[in-house]
Image (cartoon, helix red, strand yellow):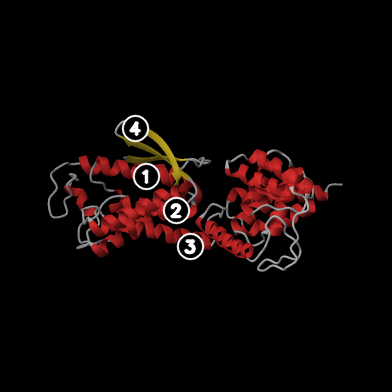
């Protein structure tokens, strides 16, 4: 079986100019290094791929390293298969990151990832190194941290069987990491697997640093958000194990403990509706889940769904232009889950501010929300949107 990544399911909102420029630069350098003043490679650093002699000094040579080689080696490739697969991986994983980091940030990260990869390879091998694999491994490591739930489309070919599969990117990347580690410590081939491992580690560490310092926009699909949800699930299971009834939250139930006077639900429809909403969300029927949520609220206005379910239902109500119940659902989320991921909290408060400013008029609450999240918005478009809404609110307030 030969699974080859060919794309992702994340829509591209902006053209990834820098990623395409890096791919073009690699292709151009490959053409020049294999054709310009072509003559047989000489010396111990000559690769089997036939790179011309003038370009050998641009490889990363551990016995005689120069600073420029840590950058130039990233753009040299041995053969068509080498550059072909590298550029395919860069196209699949780099486009979304280019949009996430911006052009300058993405270029700086890409080159830094290649430098770290080269340093790691030099620790275990004295052989000259070339290729973008280390840089691209850093890209996949960062992808694992920032976009682990994005699905990768794989072209699968097994004899006469041909198909396209979609799997979560984290499974594919973790499989690749395991393969690199296995090959490094068992095969000992001419492939620079330690550059792959070092690049991936650099991408993961840089990604965690970017999320922790909020230098990139957080969302509820990144790795830290996933770990936070896992922690909340563990706390929730511990509370349930002590006797908490999740379908009947009462004032007698505390966050980290329960009292003995938990009463059963008074309306049997509540349990069945909550179960049906959960089932509909599992099969991605958000429209049906939102309708079930409205029925649940009609029976008991105090009912709140699990954190991510509450967000999904509120977003569906917003998309359906049911602004009043959407606002109420978002408000319940902020009230019940005040310690959820910061990135998701910011996104929800921004959405709520827009709802109150534009559709479900509540200018005082809109101003409160937008002013609160403005310092933590790092996406230029979102910040501009919040500032524009605040300006419009000021204009409306000053009008007679």
The mark lying in front, picked from 1 and 2, is 2
Q: Nearer the N terminus, badge 1 or badge 4? A: 1
Q: Are marks 1 and 4 in contact (CB under 8 Å)?
A: no
**Which numbered disc covers residue 89?**
1
The residue lying at 83 percent from left, 47 percent from top is 399
Query: Which label lies toward us, 3 or 4?
Result: 4
Give coordinates of residue 251: x percent, y percent. 76, 64
Q: Earlier in the sequence, mark 2 or mark 4?
A: 2
Position in image of residue 203 (x %, y %): 41, 57
Residue at mark 4: 161
**Which is in the foreground here, disc 2 or disc 3?**
2
The mark closer to the camera, 1 or 4, is 4
Query: Which mark is first along the chain, 4 or 3?
Result: 4
Q: Residue under circle 2?
A: 144
Real-space Cα distance between discs 2 and 4? Answer: 29 Å
Asked if labels 3 and 2 touch by Cβ distance under 8 angstroms, the answer is no
Q: Is residue 151 left or right of residue 279?
A: left
């Amino acid at each position: 079986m030969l699974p080859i990544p060919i794309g992702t399911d994340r829509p591209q909102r902006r053209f990834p100019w820098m990623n395409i420029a890096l791919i073009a630069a690699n292709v151009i350098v490959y053409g020049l290094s294999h054709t310009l003043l072509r003559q047989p490679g000489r010396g111990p650093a000559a690769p089997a791929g036939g790179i011309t002699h003038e370009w050998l000094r641009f490889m990363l040579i551990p016995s005689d390293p120069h600073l420029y080689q840590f950058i130039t080696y990233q753009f040299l490739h041995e053969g068509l298969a080498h550059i072909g697969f590298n550029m395919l991986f860069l196209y699949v994983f780099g486009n979304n990151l280019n949009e996430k980091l911006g052009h300058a940030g993405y270029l700086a990260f890409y080159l830094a990832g290649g430098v770290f990869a080269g340093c790691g390879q030099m620790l275990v091998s004295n052989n000259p190194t070339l290729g973008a694999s280390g840089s691209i491994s850093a890209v996949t490591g960062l992808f694992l941290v920032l976009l682990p739930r994005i699905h990768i489309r794989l072209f699968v070919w097994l004899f006469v069987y041909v198909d396209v599969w979609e799997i979560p990117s984290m499974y594919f990347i973790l499989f690749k990491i395991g393969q690199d580690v296995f090959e490094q410590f068992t095969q000992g081939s001419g492939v620079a697997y330690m550059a792959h491992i070092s690049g991936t580690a650099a991408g993961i560490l840089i990604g965690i640093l970017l999320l922790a310092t909020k230098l990139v926009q957080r969302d509820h699909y990144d790795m830290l958000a996933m770990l936070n949800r896992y922690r909340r699930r563990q706390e929730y299971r511990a509370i349930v194990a002590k006797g908490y009834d999740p379908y009947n939250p009462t004032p007698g139930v505390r966050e980290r403990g329960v009292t003995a006077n938990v009463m059963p639900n008074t309306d049997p429809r509540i349990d069945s509706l909550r179960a049906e909403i959960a089932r509909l969300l599992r099969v991605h029927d958000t429209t049906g889940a939102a309708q079930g949520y409205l029925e649940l609220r009609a029976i008991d206005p105090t009912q709140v769904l699990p954190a991510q379910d509450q967000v999904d239902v509120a977003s569906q109500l917003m998309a359906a232009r049911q602004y009043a119940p959407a606002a109420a659902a978002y408000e319940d989320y902020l009230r019940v889950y005040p310690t959820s991921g910061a990135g998701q909290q910011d996104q929800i408060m921004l959405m709520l501010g827009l709802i109150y400013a534009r559709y479900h008029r509540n200018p005082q609450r809109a101003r409160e929300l937008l002013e609160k999240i403005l310092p933590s918005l790092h996406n230029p478009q979102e910040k501009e949107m919040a500032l524009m809404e605040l300006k419009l609110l000021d204009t409306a307030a000053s009008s007679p």
